[in-house]
Image (cartoon, helix red, strand yellow):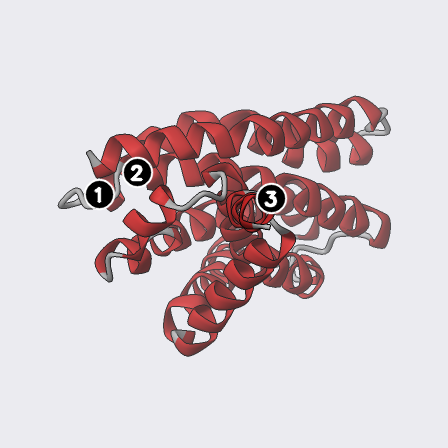
Amino acid sequence: MTHTIKNQQNSPTPNMLVATFKRDLHTSWRQKGDMLTPLFFFLVVASLFPLAIGPEPAILKKIGAGIVWVAALLATILSLPRLFTTDYQDGSLEQIILAPTPLWLVVHAKVAVHIFTTALPLVLITPFLGLQFALEQESLKILVLSLAIGLPTLSYLGAIGAALTLGIRGGGVLLAVLILPLYIPVLVFGSGAVDAFTAGLGISAHFSILAALFLITTFFGPFAVSAALKISME
């Protein structure tokens, strides 16, 4: 009987992941300012370009997808420090690392909260921003789909940088320096899908690469984040 109880305590359970997800989601809702800042940043940055460039539809169509993608990328970077900062400051991160539940599973739950509170709102607001760039309906659908696949990839990649720079003074700048080179392939193929469609070319290759990047980061990312967290806590 004792052996059974020990096995239950030492085995990872979905309840732990659900509890982590709910706790981080509740914390995000309590800190609404931190959660809404990336969204407002995304809106402001993407809206300033049409005002500065002018109302020429041909120009706006050409640069629209790239601007939206860059704004979404920067908004994602802006939200990354809060991934582990709260747990690091209150000391619970050390307990999470020492817990019997594999750390990479907990990382999955934390990144899922980041996707739910940051990436999802950016994707949902994109159709309204796309209208000011005179994007056609089909181009807008491709842009939204590319963001829906690409932004979760940015969250997993960004979690690695957030873990490595945890507790470092001025870590936000260092985080951007570390992560931006990793973001370039996602940015290129995400915005390139819309450009390819506008030019009458195939887009399957772009989405295949985006999907491959998502699968790779989803599988290997949590292990890299776990290693980075352990290094930061030493």
Answer above or below: position of 228 versus 2: above
Instruction: Tell me which label, 1 or 3, sits earlier in the chain.
Output: 3
Residue picked out by circle 1 = 171
Report how far apart the C-alphas of labels 2 and 3 lie in the structure: 17 Å
As shown in the figure, which amino acid type bears the numbered disc 2?
Leu
Q: Amino acid at mark 1?
A: Gly
Q: Are marks 2 and 1 in contact (CB under 8 Å)?
A: yes
Q: Quadrant of residue 177?
A: top left
Seen at 36% across and 35% down, the residue is 161
Q: Is residue 63 above or below residue 208?
A: below
In the displayed structure image, the side of residue 52 where residue 131 appears, left or right: right
**Spatial distance from mark 1 to mark 3, Cα to Cα?**
22 Å
User: What element does badge 1 sit on?
Assistant: helix
Which residue in the protein does label 2 denote? 175
Residue at 32 percent of width and 57 percent of height: 87
Mark 1 residue crowding within 10 angstroms, few (<14) / some (14–19) / many (20+): some
Q: Secondary structure at mark 3?
A: helix
Residue 131: image x %, image y %? 71, 61
> Height in image: 156 above or below 136?
above
Q: Circle 3 sits on which residue? A: 152
Chain-order first, disc 2 or disc 3 = 3
Q: Is residue 52 above or below residue 161?
A: below
